[in-house]
Image (cartoon, helix red, strand yellow):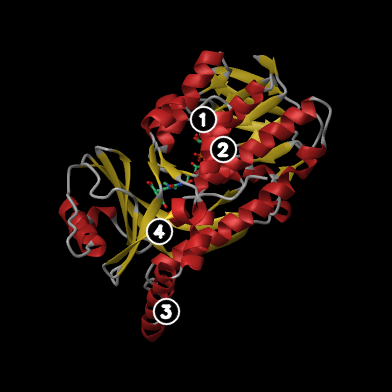
Amino acid sequence: MAERTTVAVIGAGPAGLLIGAVLAAHAVPFVIVEHRSREHVLSRIRAGVLEQASVDVLERYGLAERLHAEGLVHGGIHLQVEGERTHVDFRALVGRTVTVYGQQQVVLDLMRHHDALGSAVHYSAEDVRPEGIDGDAPVVRFRVDGVDHELRADFVVGADGYHGVCRTLVPDGVLAPAERGYDAAWLGILADVAPSTDELIYALHPEGFAMHSMRSPTVSRLYLQVDPGEDLAQWEDDRIWAALQERLGSPGWTLTPGPITEKSITPMRSSVAATLVYGRLFLAGDAGHIVPPTGAKGLNAAIADVALLGEALAAQARGDDGPLAAYSTTALARQWKIQSFSQYMTELLHVPGPDVARDERAFDYASRVGRLRYVTGSRYAQQSLAEQYTGLAIA
Ligand code: RFL
Ligand code: PHB
């Protein structure tokens, strides 16, 4: 089946679906191609915190109605060091807030938006192959329900995540990602229990980092630092709750456990492509860069990329190619600030991993406790943290 459009979007995660919404708002034709089923895309439990800038973007494209009704507005976070808890008050420090609203909810809102618009979104597409991106007539081939599709487009947006196909189309020497790993992973759980806290708690404890987040007034999301390569089978529910209780413990406070409905281990990695553009291909979101989750930035960075790229593609359709030419440079300059903050938050809150020599481990841990106590005791340090956590301007 032969089709023709202006922008072929690969991936229907938050980046792909949102760029579709931006293009639709400007009446730029697009088609989205996703290799998983709609149900699978909706079942992935991931991010939970939206920066104010991200909420503003969703509002701008008419996507924030349910977010405003059901999202939990948080005016700060709790930072904890060895049981001492300090509230970092974003409203007082920088006059901004964040909204706790699951990535799945953002994706569901976007899917409903596209349903209402009647957008072309192909789920369960097999063998997705963008071709000719280094020429001026790219084509995306894929198969749905046994039918071969040939989608011709002026531009291809790679919104297919870190493990997607689009990154692999850019020659190694051009993509040239700057990368680093961390000697820690996160064991995350979702539990059917009311959160034991009003706002997120990020805690440093000699046994490792722990965090208490949430999805709604009845669903909690919690994380524990574990070693990379840790076996999830070794973590019975009781062991998880005991570790969370120990690491998040603070005088006069208790953690209420409940039925765990999901658990998984996620490794931590940072990676930034040297460019987000190759010929007619533009990378956005995790396809271009990933961060460790400690700063709550991955989804927000994807939204920021898409706000820039969607508007740039719309300007290009009106005959102004300036914003599209500037996209990669503008997005990467912002991305490196996000990388720096995510690395800072990760190093601030995690204990050194198993590979660090014992004497250095003791030093590194004590120095992290010192750094965190500096932050909890300094309005200047908190103001900088609050400014970055609630989100830098998009452009
Ligand atoms: P996604 O969400 O990975 O979507 C990519 C889509 O592309 C599809 N795809 C393909 N489609 C067609 N052909 C192919 N060959 C394809 N290959 C892949 C995939 O099926 C998928 O549907 O990338 P996107 O849209 O760039 O969105 C990025 C975010 O998902 C990610 O950055 C965040 O989830 C990161 N993240 C967090 N970000 C935040 O801003 N705040 C947080 O609190 C936060 N917490 C987290 C997180 C990520 C986590 N994990 C599991 C990695 C917590 C965790 C535990
Ligand atoms: C989450 O709720 O999943 C979450 C919140 C904050 C983070 C990371 C993940 O920094």
**Mark 2 or mark 4, which has the lower sequence index?**
4
Does dot 2 land on a helix, a strand or a loop?
loop
Q: Which residue is mark 3?
A: 367
Q: Nearer the viewer, mark 4 or mark 1?
A: 4
**Residue where numbered disc 1 is placed:** 35
How many residues crowd mark 1 within 10 Å: few (<14), some (14–19), many (20+)?
many
Vertical relation: 7 (above or below) 387: above
Query: Above or below — where is 363 with respect to 98?
Result: below
Q: Nearer the viewer, residue 204 or 287?
A: 204
Q: Which residue is mark 2?
A: 160
* Labels 1 and 2: the sequence-earlier one: 1
Q: Residue at x 79, y 41 (%)?
A: 325
How far is disc 4 from disc 3 in space, using C-alphas?
A: 21 Å
Question: Which residue is the site of mark 4?
Answer: 88
Q: Pointer 1 and pointer 2: residues touching (CB < 8 Å)?
A: yes
Tell me: is circle 2 under 8 Å from ligand 1.
yes
Query: In what quadrant of the picture does the N terminus appear?
Result: top right
Residue 370: which quarter of the image?
A: bottom left
Left or right placement of residue 225 versus residue 28 in this view:
left
The kind of secondary structure element at disc 4 is: strand
The residue at 55%/13% (across/down) is 118
Classify 10 Å Cα crowding around label 3: few (below 14), some (14-19), many (20 and above).
Answer: few
Nearer to us of marks 1 and 2 is 2
Disc with the residue nearer the chain's start (4 vs 1): 1
